[in-house]
Each structure stands twice: as structure tokens, then as C-alpha cells.
Amino acid sequence: MTGLLSTLGTLRLFNATLSAQGVPAGDDDKSLICLFLFGGNDANNLLIPRDNVSYAKYAIDRGILAIPQDGLLPISSLGGDGREFGLHPSMAALHGLYNTGKMAMVCNVGTLVAPITKAEYLSGGAAIPPHLFSHNDQQVQWQTSVPDSSKNVGWGGRLADLMNYHNSTAQISMNISIAGSNFFQVGEQVQQYQVTSSGSIGLEGSGSPWAPNPQLFAANSQMLGRSYGHIFEQEYANVMKRGIANDSLLKSAIAANPLPNEANLFQNSLTAAGALNRVAAQLRMILRMIQARNALGMKRQIFFAALGGFDTHDAQLADHAALLSQLSTGIADFQQHTEELGIGDKVTLFTASDFNRTYNSNGKGSDHAWGGHHLIVGGAVNGGQLYGAMPNLDIRGPDDTGSRGSWIPKVSTDEMAATLARWFGVAEADLPLVLPNIGRFAMPNMGFMKP
């Protein structure tokens, strides 16, 4: 039965792929980047109420976590109820992108099994994502979009499985991570390929031009070229051979397609020591791989990058400001360079995170919460707007799960992901193959991406 179901699933995916191939303008290059903020980003200090009445209440409720009102970077979008908002002072570079329409924000988005009200949450009358407020569980659920399933296949992996026909001449995986293994890129057919911010990781003695050693090359080739009777031994050899081939291929493609004026890129993202910050270093590597896309035979690429340190239970004000500064300068520099390369509208970056943090303080920082706000950046974004619905921001109010300001999401991760998947080329009828729960929600297209 299991084999039959697997076969049926493969046939369905094949039919969906044929359907997707009929989508007009499906052959243009597109790259999607997930930038995951590990630890739970405090979105309450990412987007802050700025009008006098709302700010006064914010300052009381947030206490030591409140950002001074005169330092907020104003945005023109209202919260739908007359409230005015501003960005954190460390977000100056992204504030510029927002004002020029290259960045949008999705408000109060989080993991959901289905839409839920506060009454249903308190009564236990509706399903909620299991293990809410747990880092590991919520990271997996954000990346898979199926909190009610134990199958850890990522929505980025399912997206790659469906759209990989675009890369018919590709010699490397559509899914590339610059931040280690992740669930987002786990597919049924497409495997993630991991590199570092400095490039691919080679094997000493592999025989590549970057590690010439004839004796080790001969030994490796002999060992990996054997046929092994044990399935795990054979698969290990296959993985090693694939890794060696990918390393050589990627290094050759990047060397043959350098970024123009690379030494002077990401200048706003340099640390005091003169090195690139963690976000910029990863995005520069992604830019190199996008630049080499033709040599790699890629029409579609999905990348995973990450920044850790957002579990701010203490010392939050200083630590969070430093993290947001990295985020802001790195993303803004990246967007500028995609435009310089003429691909600004073909690359879209979005942020994700475990969860938001509590509105009130624990005395030093904040604790685990639920719905938060996320960034969508790129030339194809309908920017300069807030999407979704800002929460009430009243502790114990209609959007709070309890007494500390943990907002019940008004937007599911599925809805945000579906809007990105549609831009990437997925036909509306095929969205359930990428996001199995999307039919439970009202907004499969939130409108933050241009057609």
C-alpha cells in the first residue's frame, strides 16, 4: 500500500508539472531566498506604533524594551485603523527600500493548522500547531507549513520538486543552502546542496584543480568507483561522488562568471574589522551563484540563508539592534547589487523565524510568543505597504493568547508561502502540492507580489 501511495503521489506530481509547463512566461529566471532568523525575532520592535496615543500604550506595555519614539523611522502605511507605524532605528537601509516600493511587510503571520479565534484557542475547540513556543518544533513547522503532519518535507522542497522541469539542463541542485541543513529545502526528488559563504566544500585529493594530488585522487577514485553490496555503503559512495562533482562544477562556474567589481560590493555591510557581516557574506555567495546561473543550467533557484541570535531573553535592546543592523544593511546591499546586475525583479527574499516574542518584558528581554511580522524584498514586490492585519496590541486583548502579548496569527505561513510560490511560477491549481493546507485559508494570493 505504501508503494502504491508513493507511486500515485509521483504520478500526481508529474501531472502537475505538465500543468505548470503550460503557464505562460514560465521560462524566465527566478530566484527565491529564505532568510531564517533563528531564535524568534522580536517583531514587536521591528514594526512599532508611532502615533502619540498608540505609542504611549506601547511604551507602557513594553517597558524597558520600548524604543524611543523620536528614533522611529516613519512609514506611510497605516494599520487599517488609523494607527501610524515606524521601523526600528537600525532598519534605516531597509526603510529606504520600503519607501521606494522594493520592500513590503506581512503582519501577524505564523504557523496555523487552520484559522482560529481567541475563544477557540482558550476553549480548546480548534486545532493549534503542536508544541507552540518550542524553538525546534516551530522552526520545522515554519519550514514545512504542515504543523499537523509528522512528515518533514519542506515547502521549498515541494516547490523545487514541482518546478524543477525549468532546470532541464541543470548540473546542480535547485535548492542550495548557505546555512547548513534545513527542513525548508527537503524534497521528495530534489536534494539540498550545502555550501558555505566562502563557496563549496571540496575533498582533499578529489583531483579538482583546487586540490591537485594525483596519489590521493587515484585512491579516492578507486574507492568511490567500486560497487558496494551494502545499500548504505553504496549510497555513501554516491553522495561522495556527487559532492566532488558539485564542488568542481560550482567552483568552475563561479570562477568563469565573476561578479563585476566584486571587491567593492556590500560596502555598507562591513564590520568594524573590515569583514562582511554574517548576512552579507551569505547573500554575496548567493549573488555569485545567481550570476553563474547560465553556466549551471539554472532557470529557477531556491536558496536558504540564516542569522541566529534572536532568542533574546536578556540584553535584548543592544543585541536586537545589532542583529537588525546586519539584516538591514546586508539585504539592502544585496537588493542594490541585483538591480545593478539587471535582475532586481527576478530575485525575491523573504524572512521567516520561529515565532514572535512577548509584548511585555521578563525584566531583561522577552520570551517566546506566536504571530509576528516578516519582510518581503525584491523588484517584483508590491512594496511600500503592510499586508495581513496588525494585531490589536492590547495585552489580554482580543488577539492575545493570554496575559503577556502573544498574538494569535491572522495570516498563516501557508498564505505567505502561496503568494511567493505563485510568483515563482506555480499554477493556482497546483498550490496544494506545495502547501497541502492552503485550502483551509482565505488568501492564497495576498497581493504583495506583482503578476
Image: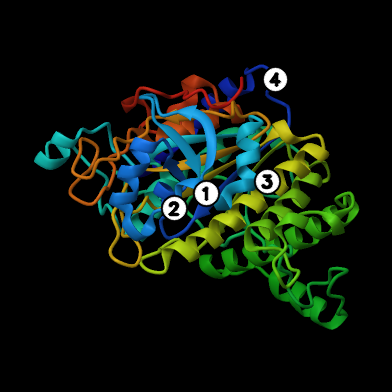
Question: Percent x, y for residue 267?
Answer: 78, 56
Question: Which of label 1 and label 4 is nearer to you?
Answer: 1
Instruction: Return the residue at label 3.
Output: 332
Question: Which of label 2 and label 3 is nearer to you?
Answer: 2
Q: Amino acid at mark 2?
A: Ile
Residue 432 showing in the rendered view: yes
Q: Residue at x 20, y 35 (%)?
A: 398
Badge 1 element: helix
Q: Establish if 398 lies above or below 81.
A: below
Indicate left or right for 272 with 413 as reference.
right
Q: CA distance from mark 2 to mark 1?
A: 7 Å
Indicate left or right for 404 with 313 as reference.
left
Question: Percent x, y for residue 408?
Answer: 27, 40
State if disc 1 and disc 2 touch (CB < 8 Å).
yes
Q: Establish if 122 lies above or below 183.
A: above
**Residue 67, which numbered label?**
2
Question: Percent x, y for residue 362?
Answer: 28, 63
Badge 2 element: loop
Mark with earlier residue (3, 1): 1
Indicate left or right for 126 with 84 as reference.
left
Instruction: Return the residue at label 1.
Output: 71
Q: CA distance from mark 1 to mark 4?
A: 44 Å
